[in-house]
Amino acid sequence: MIRATSDGRPLMAIKVLIGVAVVGILALGSSVAATALLQPEGSDDSTTSSMRQCLEDLGVKTEDSKDGQSWGVPSAANENVEPQIARCEAEYRAMVGQNDAEKANFDKYTRDLQACLSERDIAADPVWDGPEGELSVGWKFHGISVEDKRVEVAMGECSREASSH
Amino acid sequence: MMFMTKKLAAQVASVAVGASLASVLIVPAFPTVASAEAGCNDGGDVGYRSIGRGNTWTDYHDSWRYYAKITDSGSPSTKFSYLSVADSDSNSLYFQYFSDDAGMYNNGNHFDRVADRAKIGNQGSSTHTYIWKRSCTK
């Protein structure tokens, strides 16, 4: 048990301990909050920030397709929804970030995919032909038709492999 | 039977050479409508594209039908990718989500709609690679 004395030193020690605990709790709380904010959805069934949910939250009417396997934004029920679409895309992009680290991740994925294709004797080069700042590349193949089924199979396998690195 | 003098033969040859030269010079200067449609006469086009999360890729071509599917089915968050097409004349717009569902993967996703613009969006949690096709409607 800590007793307060006339010189106040134990009392100061208690104040310091409380201060450290408060700082620790605040740090833990902010860490959890940051994780929740930056955690991109994907592997679960959460639709909290999916495109459809985002659009509906902004008042855009959506509907299931006839086969029930997709959904759409019918033009008859909506007018000028491009701004809402752009906003939902921008919100997600802001959440996952478009910074140097993200660019580095994309570059690594591209290199890994190219190397994986090479191991399967498929020569391909990434072509940066999209708008400035967009993480998007087309693929140019050499010595094999882009429509060759082996390309599609290799692309699928190599993309999964590159994503897992 | 027609007899040709040397002078007439030279004139005919001259006209023939001239016509040949003219055709060489004139044809490239007047491309056909089809060739001006950026491959619209060749039946279509196909390609692969890798897109980072939160990014999109847009293709602008007049009067095409679009098809796209994700190549890396089974990767995380593939169902958060989408294809949208828009026809600026009718202001129509339609979205279609990609899916990991086997049937959807095998069948792919396509639009039997004439569009001026197609966009593949990746709202997933990792980079994905897509195969896209477009076919001319003219």
Image (spheres, coloured by chain):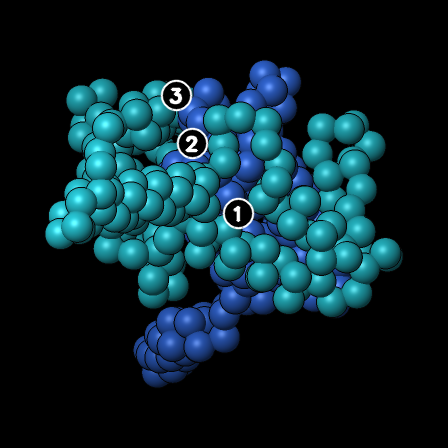
Chain colours: A cyan, B blue
Marks 3, 1 in one chain: no
- The quadrant of the rendering that contains the C terminus of chain A is top left
Q: Is residue A122 visible?
A: no
Q: Is residue B18 above or below residue A116?
A: below
Q: Which residue is mark 3?
A: A153
Q: Residues within 10 Å of mark 2 (few under 14, many from 20)?
A: few
Residue A135 lies, in percent from the top left, at: 35, 52
Mark sitting on residue A24? none
Q: Is residue A12 above or below residue A113?
A: below
Q: Amino acid at mark 1?
A: Ile
Identify which residue, A153 or B50, lies in the foreground: B50
Q: Residues within 10 Å of mark 3 (few under 14, many from 20)?
A: few
Q: Which residue is mark 1?
A: B120
Residue A109 lies, in percent from the top left, at: 26, 37
Q: Amino acid at mark 2?
A: Glu
Residue B115 lies, in percent from the top left, at: 67, 55
Mark nearer the viewer, 2 or 1: 1
Q: Is residue B62 left or right of residue A32?
A: right
Q: Is residue B118 left or right of residue A135?
A: right
Q: Which residue is mark 2?
A: A147
